[in-house]
Each structure stands twice: as structure tokens, then as C-alpha cells.
Image (cartoon, grey):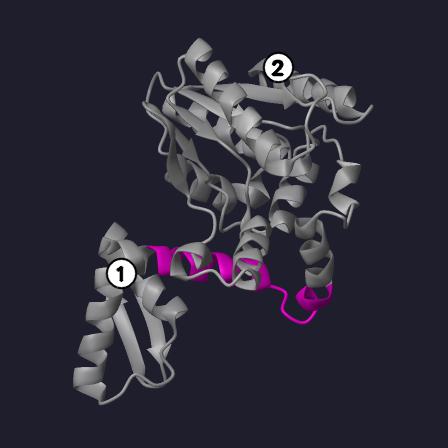
């Protein structure tokens, strides 16, 4: 892909999360928008490196006249990236968001069976996670709701739903599309503030100018809370680091989850490096 070199870190991060296996079929849900276009291109790159293959699945709800343009964009994207595109038209029907989502996932499950895919990938990103966490907070949800969108879950027996972009900000995905000259479509319904998610999205724009990495921070917090609740290795490593620092330094002031998490990730993956935790405290991973 032309212009991809500046985005090598993004490609590497997504490829690591995807961990494609030789001969595997990766099924990408591609709406035609910039987020799913970037997902499709990133999966195509990951599949190529792993000698796997990628299939683009496009589900057309026919809710607006321009929906067929979205399908044309998905087909053009597949042609540009050398990926097979399987399109399903569900026909006009309900406008209920929950039912539409269920119908879409059911269609993706059918396409997965037809193509031999065991994993379906969607383009939910860090801004989607921010909106989900805030909507859960506004509803008065507990810790489970504040974990936000899970990175992985079972879609149906033998089929996993994976969201490898949850900690990636949408600007990075749009830049990736522009660098690769990828065809994209824009959904005008994303501006309709009658939908609660769109209203939250609009309100967040004013905050992002003051907190430019707001979405990445919320996505990281949602992941950390999920790990704390499920007791992952990273959660245990963070707790052990905190306990050892308290024992040696006397308190845990100025320690942030972000810095503890960076050390825990390095220990978990064996990545060497120096990590500054607070004034006078640096951890070296060899």
C-alpha cells in the first residue's frame, strides 16, 4: 500500500492483536466507512504477512438511498486490496438499533460459515469505546458496564468476534485511509442527534480539543477494569509491582495505571526497555 511506511507501528500493533495463522480466513465486517476501510486494509496486511487470507463482509440494511453506494465502496475496497467481498442485503425493515445489530451479526455469522472463517473482525475503535462507557455511566451501570465493549466475545459456538482497534483513535484510522488512498463512504446518519450515541459524540467534540487523547485514555481504563475484574496476568503484574513499590518506597503516590500497565505489558511480552514510574523510580526490563 502506498504511503504505509509512516503507519508501520499501527500495522504492527494490529497484526500482533490479530495473530493470524497460516491458512486462516479472516472475516472483516466492512461497511464502507473510513474505520472499516482501515480495518480491512490492516487485516489484509496482517493476512499477507501470515500467509492467511481475508474476506470482506458487507451487510446492507437498505435504510437510506445511499446504502447501495456504501456497498459499491466496499466492493471497490476489496478490488483495491485483492480481497473477496461477500455482500448481504437484509432489505428495509426495523430501525431499532438493537435489532439492526442482531440482524447484522446474524448475517456475519452466516457469511463466516460460508467462507470458513472462525473469527469475525469489526472496526470499533477508541472513540466508540468512550461513547459506550459514557452511555453506561449515564445509565448508572456498575463495573461490568464500565468495562465497555469487550475486545473479544463468542458470536456463536465456534465463531469469535474480535475488535482489534479498540485502543486506536479514529484519527489514526482516517490518516491510514488517506495514506493508502483507500475508497471510503460517509454515513450521514452518524450526524443525526436523535440517536443517543450521536448526541454523546457531538458533546465529546468540545472536550477533545482540551483532552486530545481522551479516547485512548478511556479505552485504556476500560481494558484495565476488564483485566482487574477477570484477573488476567497483566492485572496480577500491576498489583505486584504496586505492592513492591509501596514496600520499598513507602507509598504509591504519583503512580499511574498507565505507567504500571506499560511495565506489566513489557514483562508480559518480554520487551526490554526503561520505564519511568515516578520521580526517582525507574524500572528496567531486560
Horizontal and vertical percent position of residue 146: 45, 59
In this picture, residue 153 sits left or right of residue 231: right
Vertical placement of 122 versus 10: above or below? above
Query: Quadrant location of residue 116?
Result: top left
- Left or right: residue 163 versus residue 255 is right
277 w.r.t. 138: above or below: below
Does dot 1 land on a helix, a strand or a loop? Answer: helix
Q: Are marks 2 and 1 in contact (CB under 8 Å)?
A: no
Residue at label 1?
235
Residue at left 39%, top 61%?
A: 143
What residue do we see at 68% from left, 23% from top? 61
Quarter of the picture holding the N terminus: top right
The local crowd at label 2, few if under 14, some if 14 to 19, many if 20 or more residues have their Cα within 10 Å, is many
Q: Specify whether residue 6 is in view.
A: yes
Secondary structure, mark 2, is strand
- 76 w.r.t. 218: above or below: above
Query: Which of the marked residues, 2 or 1, is nearer the chain's N terminus?
Result: 2
Q: CA distance from mark 2 to mark 1?
A: 41 Å
Q: Is residue 24 magenta?
A: no
Q: Position of residue 261 (x, y in %)?
A: 34, 63
Q: Indicate the quadrant where residue 180 lies.
A: top right
Q: Position of residue 113 (x, y in %)?
A: 42, 13
Identify which residue is drawn at 56% across, 60% down. 134
Quadrant of residue 101 within the rendered picture = top right
Overall secondary structure of the magenta section: helix
Residue 271 visible? The answer is no
Q: Position of residue 206 (x, y in %)?
A: 73, 66
- Magenta residues, as a range? 206-226
Give the residue pinned by disc 2.
87
Q: How many marks?
A: 2
Q: Nearer the viewer, residue 45 or 6?
A: 45
Amino acid at each position: 500500500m502506498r504511503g504505509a511506511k509512516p503507519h508501520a507501528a499501527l500495522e504492527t500493533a494490529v497484526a500482533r492483536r490479530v495473530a493470524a495463522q497460516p491458512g486462516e480466513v479472516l472475516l472483516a465486517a466492512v461497511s464502507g466507512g473510513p474505520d472499516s476501510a482501515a480495518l480491512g486494509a490492516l487485516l489484509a496486511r496482517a493476512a499477507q504477512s501470515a500467509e492467511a487470507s481475508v474476506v470482506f463482509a458487507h451487510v446492507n440494511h437498505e435504510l437510506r438511498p445511499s446504502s447501495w453506494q456504501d456497498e459499491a465502496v466496499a466492493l471497490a475496497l476489496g478490488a483495491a486490496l485483492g480481497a473477496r467481498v461477500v455482500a448481504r442485503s437484509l432489505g428495509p425493515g426495523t430501525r431499532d438499533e438493537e435489532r439492526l445489530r442482531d440482524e447484522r451479526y446474524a448475517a456475519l455469522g452466516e457469511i463466516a460459515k460460508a467462507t470458513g472463517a472462525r473469527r469475525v473482525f469489526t472496526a470499533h475503535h477508541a472513540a466508540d469505546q468512550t461513547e459506550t462507557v459514557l452511555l453506561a455511566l449515564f445509565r448508572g451501570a456498575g463495573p461490568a458496564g464500565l468495562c465497555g465493549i469487550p475486545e473479544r466475545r463468542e458470536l456463536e459456538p465456534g465463531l469469535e468476534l474480535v475488535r482489534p482497534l479498540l485502543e486506536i483513535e479514529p484519527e489514526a484510522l482516517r490518516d491510514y485511509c488517506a495514506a493508502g488512498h483507500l475508497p471510503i463512504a460517509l454515513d450521514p446518519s452518524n450526524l443525526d442527534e436523535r440517536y443517543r450515541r450521536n448526541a454523546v459524540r457531538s458533546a465529546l467534540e468540545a472536550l477533545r480539543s482540551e483532552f486530545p487523547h481522551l479516547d485512548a485514555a478511556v479505552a485504556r481504563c476500560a481494558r484495565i477494569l476488564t483485566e482487574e475484574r477477570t484477573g488476567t496476568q497483566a492485572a496480577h503484574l500491576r498489583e505486584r509491582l504496586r505492592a513492591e513499590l509501596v514496600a520499598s518506597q513507602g507509598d504509591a503516590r504519583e503512580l499511574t495505571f498507565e505507567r504500571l500497565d506499560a511495565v506489566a505489558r513489557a514483562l508480559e511480552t518480554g520487551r526490554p526497555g526503561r520505564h519511568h514510574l515516578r520521580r526517582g523510580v525507574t524500572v528496567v526490563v531486560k
